[in-house]
Amino acid sequence: MLNTKNLPDAVNEALVTGEMISLVFRRRTDRELTRVTGRAKVEKHTSGVGSKINHTDQNLLNVFDMHHEKHKNIPLENVAFIKCRNTIFDCRKKNHLSDVEMSGNVYKRKTTKVVKVK
């Protein structure tokens, strides 16, 4: 299962530097596939108090969603694809999401390479 300790190095670097990433994941509530484009390390729309939960312990990734302009906690065990730096990281096998297909509405560019996460 994917967690914060075994994310690919390129994804970790993008999160630390605050670069744009895109995630396709299955929501916990209704099991619907959702795509979020955003970045980590955003301090806008925060109260300055900090989060009441420990994201690492609960296997969550905190991302600022650029389209909805709010912070979202993404469950890493439900992530199917992560895209950053023109590379798509395929996490389906690691998270047992083999029923999720990589269709045109997920990601489709000729310049993008696909890397399977082991």
Image: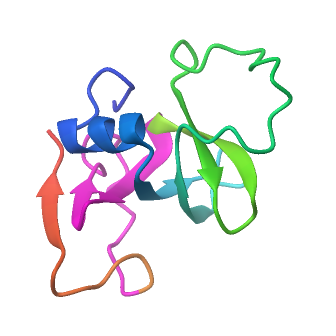
Q: Quadrant of residue 18?
A: top left
Which residue does the image show at 63% across and 49% down from the upper left?
A: 64
Report whether 47 appears left or right of 17. Answer: right
In the image, 118 versus 87, the foreground residue is: 87
Which residue does the image show at 45% across and 36% down from the upper left?
A: 77
In the image, 85 versus 91, the foreground residue is: 85
Rendered location of residue 43, percent (x, y): 68, 37
46 in the magenta segment: no
Residue ranking furthest to the right: 47
Which residue does the image show at 58% across and 19% down from the upper left?
A: 58
Rendered location of residue 7, percent (x, y): 28, 33
Q: Is residue 73 above or below residue 32?
A: above
Q: Is residue 29 above or below residue 105?
A: above
Which residue does the image show at 74% across and 44% down from the upper left?
A: 44
Report whether 112 appears left or right of 100. Answer: left
Rendered location of residue 115, percent (x, y): 13, 57
For the magenta stretch, what is the residue range? 77-104
Q: Quadrant of residue 16?
A: top left
Q: Quadrant of the C terminus?
A: top left
Asked which colour scheme the image uses, the reply is rainbow
Q: Quadrant of the N terminus?
A: top left
Rendered location of residue 114, percent (x, y): 15, 65
Q: Quadrant of residue 49?
A: top right
In the image, 99 versus 58, the foreground residue is: 58
103 in the magenta segment: yes
